[in-house]
Amino acid sequence: AQSVAQPEDQVNVAEGNPLTVKCTYSVSGNPYLFWYVQYPNRGLQFLLKYITGDNLVKGSYGFEAEFNKSQTSFHLKKPSALVSDSALYFCAVSQWDSNYQLIWGAGTKLIIKP
Amino acid sequence: EAQVTQNPRYLITVTGKKLTVTCSQNMNHEYMSWYRQDPGLGLRQIYYSMNVEVTDKGDVPEGYKVSRKEKRNFPLILESPSPNQTSLYFCASTDLGGRATEAFFGQGTRLTVV
C-alpha cells in the first residue's frame, strides 16, 4: 500500500537558521510528490511538487525540496527561516490506480522562534 | 481568480439535524474531494468524485453523503450529524489532465456538533 510518513510532529527552528521538514514515502512506480502549507485558519496552499528531472525542486516563499529516490525521501528545506514560516506542513504523493488519490502525511508543525 | 469556495466557514449544530456544506470551483476541474482534518490524524479523505455523476468512498465515508450533479459543485451532506463528526472540513479540486497537477483547497469549514 502506498503511504507517506512525516516522522516529526513538530520542528522548532530559530529565525535565520536553515530548516528541514522530513517526508518519506512508499509507492509503486514513479512518485509524484507534493508539499502543502497550512497557515492558521486557512486552507492548504500548494508549495511545490516533484514530477521528474532535477532532484532539487524550488517552490513558493523560498522553499525547496530534495527528492532522493534511494532513500525514498522528499524533505522540505529553506536556507533561512522566517517567523512567518510558522505553519503546518503536509507532504503528499499522488496515486493512480483505478482512480486518482492523494495520499497524505500526518503533517508537521513548524515553529520558527525569533 | 481561480478558487474553491466552501460555505459556511463555521457551523455549530445539534445532533441529528441534517446539514449541507457547499463546495464550488471555477476551474473546470474534473476531480473533487472532501477531507476532514483532526489533530494528530492529518487529512483523511471522505468522498471523492472523478467527474459528474461519478462519486466514490474515501477512507472515512461513514455518516456522509455527496453528490456531483454539476462539474463545479460538490456538496457534502450530513444526514444525521453526531458529535464525532466535529472537525475541520476541506473541499479540494484537481485538474486530472496532467496527472501531476496540484490540488486547490477551499478555506475550510469548522463544524461543531453538540
Image (cartoon, grey):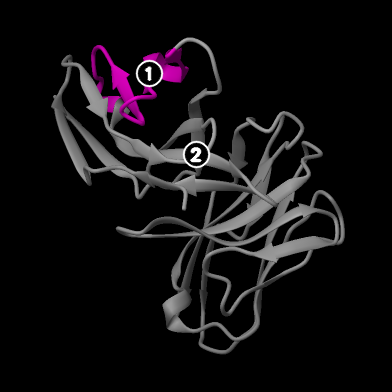
Q: Amino acid at mark 1?
A: Phe
Say whether residue A78 is left or right of residue A8.
right
Q: Earlier in the sequence, mark 2 or mark 1?
A: 1
Disc ID at residue A93: 2
Q: Position of residue B98 (x, y in %)?
A: 72, 28
What is the chain letter for disc 2?
A
> Is residue B75 within the magenta segment?
no
Residue sitting farthest toward the bottom: B16
**Residue A18 visible in rendering:** yes
Disc ID at residue B28: none
Q: Looking at the image, is A16 positioned above or below residue A23?
A: above
Say whether residue B3 is left or right of residue B15.
right
In space, the residues marked 2 and 1 are separated at their CA atoms by 18 Å
* Region rendered in magenta: A55-84
Quarter-of-image position of residue B95: top right
The residue shown at (77%, 32%) is B97
Which residue is identified by label 1? A63
The residue shown at (87%, 55%) is B70
Q: Position of residue A15 (x, y in %)?
A: 17, 20
Q: Amino acid at mark 2?
A: Val
The residue shown at (30%, 42%) is A6
Assign the C terminus of chain A to one quadrant of the image.
Answer: top left
> Is residue A67 within the magenta segment?
yes
Say whether residue B2 is left or right of residue A69.
right
Q: Nearer the viewer, residue A106 or A24?
A: A24
Query: How many numbered markers are drawn?
Result: 2
What is the chain letter for disc 1?
A
